[in-house]
């Protein structure tokens, strides 16, 4: 194989047009790493926030190859790796935050950040899963311990994390209510398994708690959106319930009085933390293996709103920042 590869890098932070196509040396895997020939990646808010310069603590060293999600075929295996061999189809979250990412022909990452890809969907579509599916999984299992019978409210049920959270909560046996700002988004959430949907722009919290949680409040409120939603979540959850979120900025000026008054649990997930710390990275692969099993059982599937080529990364980032889409935006290495 050639010793060089095509990559799409940023040499400075800024608007989507900072992406540049360039040629880099193909990286070599270390003892506990694998090298993957990249089939596809997908876009997450963390990706465009790093590109903007809004998350300097998460950014790989410039010039940087971005994007956390990846699917592809194992091309080389480090000497201490026993879980994979050349030719395996995998998906994972090996980099893009803290280390070089997947917008390139090849990516190298700790073997623990990968799992064998689901067999029931095209390999490229598996790249839409890692960040959002891991986030939804950890919100619902690690933080909220949803295991059946709960009333679960999912904010933004048509979004990246939200559309997976709806499916997972449904698969776990919960009664799921999802919010959406348009009829199209609410219908989409219902198709994914939501038992009820709410137009949060026209319906106040008390009304939808009365209608869908018996007036007592939801057992679990899942907030991958942040902003005013986190404050609203404390109104929607029942006493002794759980609010789980991905947002830290919204919590900085948040009144935690309602948590104390109602003995609530607040769980926060930063799914890329194992990669940033270089610690407990195996948990990523373990959770992805569980998620792949659910995909192959037909319980969970990523929704791809639009596909882009790697060379169209700027267009994908513009669409992502606009926010008017359902599920995920996929980038394919054509």
Image (spheres, rainbow, N blue to C red):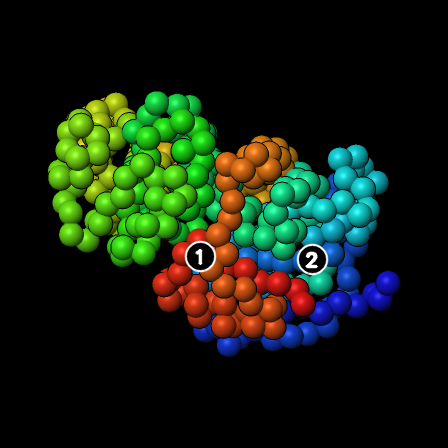
Going 59% across and 53% down the picture, which residue do you hit?
A: 125
Circle 2 sits on which residue? 38
Q: Position of residue 314 (x, y in %)?
A: 51, 72
Q: Position of residue 17 (x, y in %)?
A: 51, 76
Kindly indicate whether the residue at mark 1 contacts the one at mark 2 (C-beta within 8 angstroms). Answer: no
Number of marks in the image?
Answer: 2
Residue 297 or 267: which is nearer the viewer?
297
Q: Quadrant of the N terminus?
A: bottom right
Within-10-Å neighbours for mark 2: few <14, some 14–19, many 20+: many
- Name the mark on residue 133: none
* Helix, strand or loop for disc 2: strand
Going 68% across and 58% down the picture, which residue do you hit?
A: 39
Going 64% across and 75% down the picture, which residue do you hit?
A: 21
Q: Is residue 334 left or right of residue 217?
A: right
Residue 151 or 135: which is nearer the viewer?
151
Q: Position of residue 68 (x, y in %)?
A: 57, 53
- Name the mark on residue 45: 1
Camera sees residue 332: yes
Camera sees residue 60: no
Quarter of the image for residue 231 reads top left
Going 33% across and 30% down the picture, which residue do you hit?
A: 175
């Amino acid at each position: 194989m050639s010793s060089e590869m095509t990559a799409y890098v940023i040499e400075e932070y800024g608007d989507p047009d900072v992406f540049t196509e360039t040629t880099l040396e193909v990286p070599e895997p270390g003892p506990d790493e694998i090298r993957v020939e990249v089939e596809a990646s997908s876009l997450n808010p963390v990706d465009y926030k790093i590109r903007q310069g809004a998350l300097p603590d998460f950014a790989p060293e410039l010039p940087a190859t971005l994007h956390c999600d990846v699917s592809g075929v194992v091309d080389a295996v480090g000497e201490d790796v026993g879980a994979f061999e050349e030719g395996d189809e995998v998906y994972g979250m090996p980099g893009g935050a803290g280390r070089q990412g997947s917008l390139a022909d090849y990516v190298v990452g700790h073997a623990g950040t990968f799992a064998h890809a689901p067999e029931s969907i095209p390999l490229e579509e598996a790249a839409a899963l890692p960040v959002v599916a891991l986030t939804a999984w950890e919100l619902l299992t690690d933080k909220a311990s949803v295991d059946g019978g709960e009333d679960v409210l999912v904010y933004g049920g048509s979004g990246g994390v939200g559309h997976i959270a709806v499916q997972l909560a449904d698969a776990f046996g919960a009664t799921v209510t999802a919010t959406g700002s348009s009829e199209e988004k609410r219908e989409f959430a219902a198709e994914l398994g939501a038992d009820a949907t709410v137009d949060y722009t026209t319906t106040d919290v008390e009304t939808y708690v009365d209608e869908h949680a018996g007036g007592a409040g939801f057992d679990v409120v899942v907030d991958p959106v942040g902003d005013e939603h986190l404050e609203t979540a404390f109104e929607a959850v029942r006493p002794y319930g759980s609010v789980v979120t991905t947002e830290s900025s919204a919590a900085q000026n948040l009144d935690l009085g309602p948590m104390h008054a109602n003995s609530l649990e607040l769980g926060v997930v930063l799914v890329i933390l194992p990669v940033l710390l270089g610690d407990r990275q195996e948990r990523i692969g373990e959770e992805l293996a569980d998620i792949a099993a659910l995909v192959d059982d037909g319980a969970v599937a990523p929704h791809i709103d639009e596909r882009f080529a790697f060379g169209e990364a700027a267009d994908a980032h513009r669409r992502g920042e606009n926010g008017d889409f359902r599920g995920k935006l996929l980038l394919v290495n054509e």
